[in-house]
Amino acid sequence: FVLAEAEGQRIGMAVPELRHVMAAYDAVRDFDIVHDHTIMGPVYAEHFPDLPVVTTIHGPFNDELTDLYSRIAGRIPTIAISHAQRKPVPQIPIARVLHHGLDVEDFPFGAGDGGYCLFLGRMSPDKGAHRAIEAAEKAGVPLLMAAKMREAWEFEYFERMVKPHLNDEIQYLGEVPHEHKLELLAGARALLFPIRWNEPFGMVMIEALACGTPVLAFPEGAAPEVVDDGRTGFLCHDETDMAQAIARVGTLSRADCRAAVAGYFSTDRMVSEHIALFEDIVAGRHPRDPRPA
């Protein structure tokens, strides 16, 4: 059972999130288990000692929140979404590392015949739009960028590092609707994912693979857990390496990319792993994954 959708972009802000958490816990007193995706929820859950709760941490285990997460995970089974997310903080007890999944049938299988590479994500230095531009320019291929901008520093980054490079070959499309995003993914030769931070997962990678589009990524964050180097994409150490990988991307099978999602990064696998954990918790077992891979 899923409660009514949250307040969109406002979840993560203290007051709206707390209000949402309080309403949710008041509504689920008689449920078998609560799966919480907020920071405040597990703290509030202490008011319900007989209600089994499990929480998933979606953001990085940064220094500011490490103590809070340590205390939460010590009392409530806690899920990490990748080994990369969990690795910097081996002192935090983690019940399971469960990768995200999706329904491959929701994504069109494309031939990648658009002739362009694609950058999708937030317009920020850590996501690396400027690095994608450099790689595409070195490879001599068109690049389409679809990215959202919300904060002043994101607009400043765009003006300074991205806009000067825009031309007929390097295009910024703005923030695009979901259906347009799927069309872009299906038509792309490759998704460029040149991050330089410990990104906990990166859904756009498995979305690209579901469309049959290989992923060229820097080996940061969860990228090495998602990209099967040499099969569903290439792990690249810098922009020059990525440019060379663009030239080789035609050697990869787009069917293999899609099969990787259907075989592992699927909704079915994700759901079954969560249900197994929920059953352990309801049965009174507090499982721990001792392996900070």
Image (tube, grey):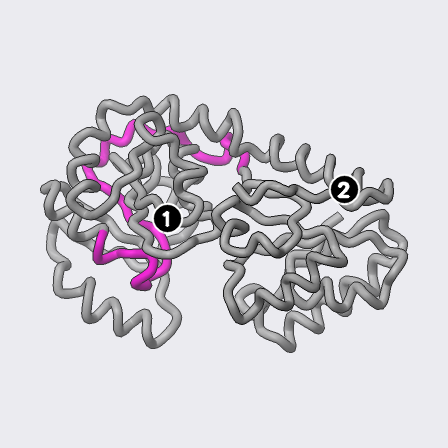
Up the image or down, 59 lies above or below 153; here it is: above
What amino acid type should be assigned to the residue bearing mark 2?
Phe
* Magenta segment: 102-131
Q: Residue at x 73, y 35 (%)?
A: 276
Residue 126 colored in magenta in the image: yes
Q: Secondary structure at mark 1?
A: loop
- Residue 130 coordinates in the image, percent (x, y): 22, 58
| Left or right for 190, reference 1 | left
Residue 78 percent location from the top left of the image: 67, 52
- Dividing the picture into quarters, in which one does residue 89 lie? bottom right
- Magenta segment, principal secondary structure? loop
Label pair 2/1, CB-CB below 8 angstroms: no
Amino acid type at mark 1:
Glu
The residue sitting at 82% across, 52% down in the picture is: 52
Element assignment for label 2: helix
Left or right, 183 with reference to 293: left
> Which label belongs to residue 220?
1
Residue at numbered disc 2? 278
**Residue displayed at 79% across by 63% down:** 45
| Membership of 36 in magenta stretch | no
Q: How many discs mark residues in the rendered view? A: 2
Can you tell which of label 2 and label 1 is closer to the viewer? Answer: 1
